[in-house]
Amino acid sequence: MDTIKSFKGYGKVDPVEEQAFRRKTRKRLIILIVSVVLLLAVIIGAVAGTLIHKSNNNDDKNSVQNSNSAAQSIKAVCSQTLHPDSCYNSISELNKSNSTDPEELLKLSLQVVYNSLSELKSLPESLEKMTDDLTVKKALNVCQIVLNDAVEYAQDSISAMDVKSGEKLLTKSKIDDLKTWLSTAITNQDTCLDALDEINSTFVTETKSRMQNSTEYTSNSLAIVSKISGILQKLNLPIHRKLLTKSESEIESELSGYPEWMPVGVRRLLQSGRPTPNVTVASDGSGNVKTIKEAMAMVPKKSKSMFIVYIKAGKYKENVVLDKSFWNVMIYGDGKDLSIVSGSLNFVDGTPTFSTATFAVAGKGFVAMDMRFENTAGAAKHQAVAFRSGSDFSVFYRCSFDAFQDTLYPHSNRQFYRDCDVTGTIDFIFGNAAVVFQNCKIMPRQPLSNQFVTITAQGKKDPNQNTGISIQKCDISAFDTLTAPTYLGRPWKEYSTTVIMQSNIGGFLNPLGWISWVSGVDPPASIYYGEYMNKGLGAGVDKRVKWAGYKPSLTSSDASKFTVASFIEGSMWLPQTKVMFDSAL
């Protein structure tokens, strides 16, 4: 029996015991596997937690570093502005990606401008509901017009920064455009205040207060644009330049540097001289329509091709306003003494100065040739504008502008006048455009008995605006018997900029040459007034004013900054009109 038991213990297994053994083994194995899995889970969790913690710490550190870098970049950019605090705060609020790229920060600053102006443009309408005074309502209507346009210029500026995927472009021409449009946006806001201020409206204070943010933001963006090249160099970032392909280069050479917004077909059409009109205006019924307004109703809005209107000889007594949606309109007549647009709106009879214009344009690319624009209200009616232009790249050739006070209003943007006549009394060339007059006849006339004559009144308010009045190679002589004290101009605003160059000045001029806006108070040193190589009996500068901001004899280097090529980039867009111009001194 013992032998049997021994053998049983060395190899032979009872079926019942074997089944029990297998159950125990399976149970132990399951426990072991579960234990291993749990242990691995604990280990993995611990490791993952450690890694995540480290990653979060690194992310936090990177986030802080990125935030600090972005803050430093914004501060560097905003240090160039007149309002660094509002600049920093407004851009930081929108800089969600912590960008340090000056171009991206510029784009954000433009968005800030657009947002603030969009909020502001509803103000005139809300104020208009608070008054029954018709004169105030008219001034608020001016505000509505110019603030709406300012919003569009902000939008234009943002659009100019949009480029194709993979490209980064901030070319000189684009910088010039941005400076011009932002300068205009500032001017437009100021024009609203001027309209309210000239009627002593009680809304001036509130409007100025509500406008503070938008004016500061626009000024900030303009400063950044104006200084962008220096900022990029300081941060060791190159300014982006577009590389032309060979074919593009050949086209640009062939077309003498025409602007991109002018279609090639139109450029070539204008080189042919007086082109075939789309519509002819004739008061005697011999044309397509009898009035200029009828012709303008046929102009397609925001047209990229030139719409040409021929205005036959005759006097057209109407007030014509072409808003910012009228692009590339050209009008020409039979001569500046034959095709005449005449109006008589004036300030004394209750119209804001801005709205008194017999003919007004705001859309880009306006051209006028062989036309006369007049306001017949007379000296007793004070402000009475013959022509107002806020048209960028506008050209006036062999035209006449005739009135008394505030005759010609180059309101804003880039403008050029060649072989034109301008007649008037007080501030009869005024505004805040970047404007050059060449080979023009500028003719002061006798005012009312208690008045003096000032040829210019320039309204630059921000040091970074690329604006001013340049009178080059013109003849400045009396229109009639002129006995009233007569001056070349007076500084209208803090940074007024006016130069008279290479012109003939008659002996009628008061030897002081210029006069202050406020009698007996010298203008601030921030103005820029100067003369360069003028001739004639009134050209002597020995007895001129002694203002800190006046330069009686500009250097050739300084004077060259106010030529067509330097001041309004005329070489890029003037050739399209076939209008002669001198690009340099």
Image (cartoon, rainbow, N blue to C red):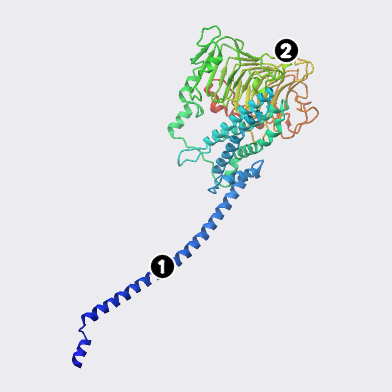
Residue 356 visible in the current orientation: yes
Q: Which residue is mark 2?
A: 480
Q: Residue furthest right?
A: 520
The quadrant of the rendering that contains the C terminus is top right
Q: Which residue is mark 1?
A: 41
Q: At numbered mark 1, what does the secondary structure look like: helix, strand or loop? A: helix
Q: Residues within 10 Å of mark 1 (few under 14, many from 20)?
A: few
Taking depth in this image into account, of 490 and 60 the one nearest to the observer is: 60
Return the x and y of residue 86 as percentages of the image width and height.
64, 43
Return the x and y of residue 460 as percentages of the image width and height.
67, 31
- Compared across the picture, whether 312 is left or right of 513 comes to left
Taking depth in this image into account, of 22 and 560 the one nearest to the observer is: 22
Say the numbered circle drawn on residue 142.
none
Q: At numbered mark 2, what does the secondary structure look like: helix, strand or loop? A: loop
The quadrant of the rendering that contains the N terminus is bottom left
Taking depth in this image into account, of 285 and 312 the one nearest to the observer is: 285
Disc nearer the start of the sequence (1/2): 1
Question: What amino acid type should be assigned to the residue bearing mark 1?
Answer: Ala
Return the x and y of residue 254 as percentages of the image width and height.
47, 26
